[in-house]
């Protein structure tokens, strides 16, 4: 066992050294704040698509979703269905138009920049409020990545959870601090590729080890008669609970329209014409990866005994790899878990720090700050945000999936309707955008703490609906946008930019 662990450690060290090397390479190429936070809008379709999806899925793809499938069976696939549909709709309807709009001005670096420019907001209020909600929900989201990293190092190397947590955070902070957006995107490209192959290999080998499809199905059916049901409810559950559970699972797809770390990939792609190719690459990656992640959990239930309880179910991928593969291969496959964690945590750190640097520091305090000053403020903010996120992640009993679900709902409700309507409704105003962000974000924060009946539905559903209603009512109650805004909207809608 000691040699096995040593082999895994060697692979991990080599992998982490490669990630840090990428950070150093791009450190030497980073000269401006646009370069640090948006890569000068030069991403090709492969890097843009795999970076977007790798940063999207995070550690929950290899930990949270397999853990849910391990406990609940095929019914957990509804989450994957919602995410697959949401991914397609986001690439199909949001990506190109957002890239066109944000390409109109070199000053648009963050989502807050875009909203202020889109509506010609007369004050910094819209920018500041949007940045505040980005900070709140990304602290939760980033902490979920650090929790996943802590669980990985703790399970593989038997480190104390806190030590494991700090190790994972230090690596992510290091290359994000050095290389900025392009380092993050290129590392995400490599990490997305590694995640893809790992999530395919592990369930295939585990299925063979469990005796093949027929034997595995028989084992699962004997252990849980409802394991293969798409519609599953706890014994004695009312019909309302079943419906709310299904709606909650599929509603994950609504979150895509408001995820800043995904939207900035659309903003950074080389040209709007590259969107179609990137969408095809992204969809293949997403559909295959989600299906395989569910398979990991289901096959893992047939192979891993005794049954993993509670939060330990999220370690099923790690258990399978440790049991079924020799050290060096196991190290590479477990590095995929690290890749999933790092590819999202780095993106979240960067978007959070861009909001603080651009939307607070520059906009409110240092409007004439130099490019060099802003880059270094961004780098230092990466460290500060990471420290706070580590503090939130100190509880080893935290569920990766629960933390991700909370942050995902917050962004989906606060920014999803705002981004969609800003791109497709000409009558929307800056007051409407402000109302949508506040109502959507606050709804998620409040709804999360309510229980029973309708309050059991995933908080993104009421948050998205209330935010949409707030945008429409606030926009219609005020003066319509000026001619300049309407003309610009028409030029984007007609494809003239």
Image: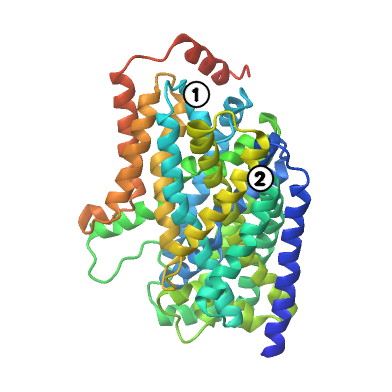
In terms of image quadrants, where is residue 431? top left
In terms of image quadrants, where is residue 71? bottom left
Q: Position of residue 188 (x, y in %)?
A: 67, 53
Classify the position of the N terminus by image quarter. bottom right
Label 1 Cα crowd, 10 Å radius (few <14 / some 14-19 / many 20+):
many
**172 lies above or below 225:** above
**N-term-proximal mark, 1 vs 2:** 1
**399 lies above or below 2:** above
Q: Position of residue 100 (x, y in %)?
A: 61, 26
Q: SS for tag 1?
A: helix
Residue occupying image coordinates x 73% and y 75%:
329
Residue 95 — which label? none
Residue occupying image coordinates x 75% and y 65%:
17
> In the image, 417: left or right of 362?
left
> In the image, 361: left or right of 208?
left
Residue marked by disc 2: 181
Asked which colour scheme the image uses, the reply is rainbow
**466 lies above or below 212:** above
Query: Toward the viewer: 424 or 374?
Result: 374
Q: Position of residue 232 (x, y in %)?
A: 35, 65
Residue occupying image coordinates x 43% and y 37%:
130
Residue occupying image coordinates x 58% and y 47%:
350
Q: SS for tag 2?
A: helix
Residue marked by disc 1: 118
CA distance separating discs 1 and 2? 23 Å
Asked whether residue 188 is in view, the answer is: no
**244 lies above or below 119:** below
Q: Residue furthest bottom?
A: 1
Q: How many marks?
A: 2
Query: Toward the viewer: 40 or 483?
Result: 40
Query: Toward the viewer: 181 or 467?
Result: 181
């Amino acid at each position: 066992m000691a040699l096995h662990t040593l082999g895994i450690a060697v692979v991990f060290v080599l992998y982490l050294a490669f990630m840090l090397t990428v950070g150093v390479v791009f450190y030497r190429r980073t000269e401006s704040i646009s370069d640090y936070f948006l890569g000068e809008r030069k991403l090709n379709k492969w890097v843009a698509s795999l970076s977007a999806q790798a940063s999207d899925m995070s550690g929950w793809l290899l930990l949270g979703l397999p853990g849910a499938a391990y406990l609940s069976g095929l019914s957990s696939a509804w989450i994957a269905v919602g995410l697959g549909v949401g991914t397609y709709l986001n690439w199909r309807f949001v990506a190109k138009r957002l890239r066109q709009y944000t390409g109109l001005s070199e000053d648009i670096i963050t989502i807050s920049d875009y909203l202020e420019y889109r509506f010609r907001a007369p004050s910094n209020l819209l920018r500041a409020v949007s940045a505040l909600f980005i900070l709140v929900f990304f602290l939760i989201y980033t902490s979920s990545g650090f929790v996943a990293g802590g669980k990985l190092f703790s399970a593989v190397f038997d480190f104390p959870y806190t030590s494991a947590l700090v190790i994972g955070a230090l690596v992510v902070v290091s290359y994000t601090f050095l290389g900025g957006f392009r380092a993050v995107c290129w590392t995400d490209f490599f990490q997305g590729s590694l995640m893809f192959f790992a999530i395919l290999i592990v369930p295939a080998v585990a299925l063979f080890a469990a005796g093949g499809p027929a034997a595995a199905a028989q084992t699962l059916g004997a252990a849980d008669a409802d394991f293969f049901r798409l519609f599953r409810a706890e014994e004695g559950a009312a019909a309302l609970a079943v419906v709310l559970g299904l709606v909650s699972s599929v509603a994950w797809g609504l979150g895509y329209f408001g995820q800043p770390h995904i939207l900035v990939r659309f903003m950074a792609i080389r040209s709007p014409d590259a969107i179609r190719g990137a969408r095809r690459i992204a969809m293949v990656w997403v559909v295959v990866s989600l299906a395989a992640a569910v398979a990991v959990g289901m096959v893992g239930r047939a192979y891993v005994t005794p049954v993993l309880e509670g939060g330990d179910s999220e370690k099923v991928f790690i258990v399978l790899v440790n049991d079924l593969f020799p050290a060096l291969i196991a190290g590479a496959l477990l590095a995929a878990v690290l890749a999933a964690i790092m590819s999202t945590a780095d993106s979240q750190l960067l978007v959070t720090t861009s909001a603080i640097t651009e939307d607070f520091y520059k906009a409110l305090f240092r409007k004439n700050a130099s490019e060099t000053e802003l880059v270094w403020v961004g780098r230092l903010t990466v460290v500060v945000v990471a420290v706070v996120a580590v503090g939130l992640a100190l509880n080893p009993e935290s569920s990766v999936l629960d933390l991700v679900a909370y942050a995902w709902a917050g962004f989906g409700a606060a920014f999803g309707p705002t981004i969609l309507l800003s791109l497709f409704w000409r009558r929307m105003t800056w007051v409407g955008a402000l109302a949508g962000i506040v109502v959507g974000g606050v709804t998620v924060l409040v709804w999360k703490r309510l229980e029973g009946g309708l309050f059991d539905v995933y908080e993104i559903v009421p948050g998205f609906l209330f935010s949409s209603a707030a945008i429409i009512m606030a926009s219609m109650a005020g003066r319509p946008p000026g001619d300049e805004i309407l003309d610009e909207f028409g030029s984007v809608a007609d494809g003239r930019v």
